[in-house]
Amino acid sequence: MDSDAQANLGEVLVVEDTPASLKLLTDLLRGEGYVVRQALDGEVALWSARSRPPELVLLDVRMPGLDGFEVCHRLKQLAGMADVPVIFLSAQHDTEDKLRGFRSGAVDFIGKPYQAEEVLARTGTHIKLARTQRALAHANLELSATLDQLRSARDAIQRSERLAALGAMVTGVAHELNTPIGNGVLAASTLTERARGFGTQLGDGVRRSELALFIDEVQHAADLLSRNLNKSAALIASFKQVACDQSSMERRSFHLAPLVRDTCAVLMQSLTGRPVTLQLEIDAGMAIDNYPGALSQILSHLVRNAVLHGFDAAPQGTIRIAACEEDGDIISLSVGDSGSGIAPAHLERIFDPFFTTKLGQGSCGLGLNIVHNLVANVLGGTIQVTSIPGDTRFLLRFPRSAPVLAGAAPPHRPG
């Protein structure tokens, strides 16, 4: 057998203080195709292993000087030897000897007198097992590195999604505020011009009817200005609440209905032009102690997912969000849509990271994976999905009082 084939079978260090036995084992292993190194005592064995670790050690237990147990213990301390299998060679069949051998690091025993088939079988098995373990360890390192890269990619995509969501929110805020602010500016400028004109009239005298008309116009402009300023203030308060909830993981007590309503109000502004009707069916008095930021993010992802995937080709559609209380202080929250539905083949993978049927069309496949992680790891609940054309439904079930996140601040109780 050529040297390459021998090297491929494995390199064995045989430690045996009896020359005849050493020669017997060496000839047997070399004849089968192994590379064999010899040592007549423990000191030579340690020196040989230190210079170049073998793939397997056949080690005699009863030797003068250092016995096999001590040699095995020292071998395991050497660099590169911790995972090298050691098989003891012993004429003893005492259970205590075997236990002591295993404690010192051995993986197997071969009894004397040697049986060729047993020696070859145990040698081949342990070398293959050690190689498999090394291959698995290497594969685990590569897998760990790949997972680190995927986590980095996921974090980058999540940052991109957050920026995109921020952009959508800013667009929605600008669009929604444009009307009341524009109306307020028009009312204020009209009032200014009318007041300037009325001031000019004062020099020539003003009739009672003209004064009454001016007062009526001023009141009308002031009412219009007040209504639009109040609407703007309410919108800003709503946006601030949603933005605060979506950017924090603060746990607090709150009513579910206003949170859902405010979150959806922001979402609908960013979905202007989409043929979507939103229906909310949540008891106004339903109070929970949970993480509003996580719930806002979950709702945002689910509504956007419905619009992107359910209504991409539909002339119109409805998104229905409903919640109820179950026994045991469990909240059941469903987000359903009347869209085209999810293909059965996709249902099993829908929460997998990076799975999407709209790659390059506004989806990177992380939205529902983020939803699943938030439901399971933040709300302490579960999420399920069922779908047929015209009825897709995500059902969330989570405790009214959420588990405290590791490292999170204590729950905030409104004073």
Image: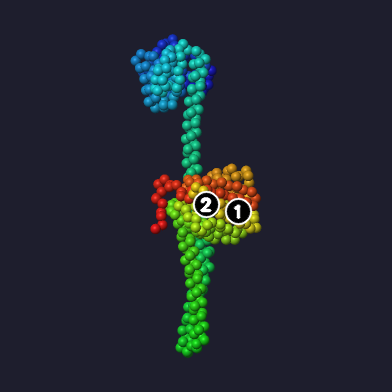
Q: Position of residue 248 (x, y in %)?
A: 44, 53
Residue 39 in view: no
Q: Residue at x 43, y 53 (%)?
A: 252
Q: Earlier in the sequence, mark 1 or mark 2?
A: 2
Q: Position of residue 273 (x, y in %)?
A: 59, 61
Q: Position of residue 303 (x, y in %)?
A: 56, 54
> Mark 1 or 2, which is nearer the eye?
2
| Observer-nearest of 335 and 162 | 335
- Residue extending farthest to the left is 65
Task: Classify mark 2: residues with Cα within 10 Å, few (<14), some (14-19) or many (20+).
Answer: some
Q: CA distance from mark 1 to mark 2?
A: 21 Å
- Judging by the rendered image, the residue that carries numbered circle 2 is 325
| Observer-nearest of 224 and 352 | 224
Q: Give the vertical position of 150 relative to 105 (above or below).
A: below
- Residue extending farthest to the bottom is 204
Q: Position of residue 58 (x, y in %)?
A: 44, 18
- Residue extending farthest to the front is 327
Name which residue type carries label 2: Glu
Residue 390 in view: yes
Helix, strand or loop status at disc 1? strand
- Judging by the rendered image, the residue that carries numbered circle 1 is 337
Task: Classify mark 1: residues with Cα within 10 Å, few (<14), some (14-19) or many (20+).
Answer: many
Q: How many marks?
A: 2
| Observer-nearest of 137 and 179 | 179
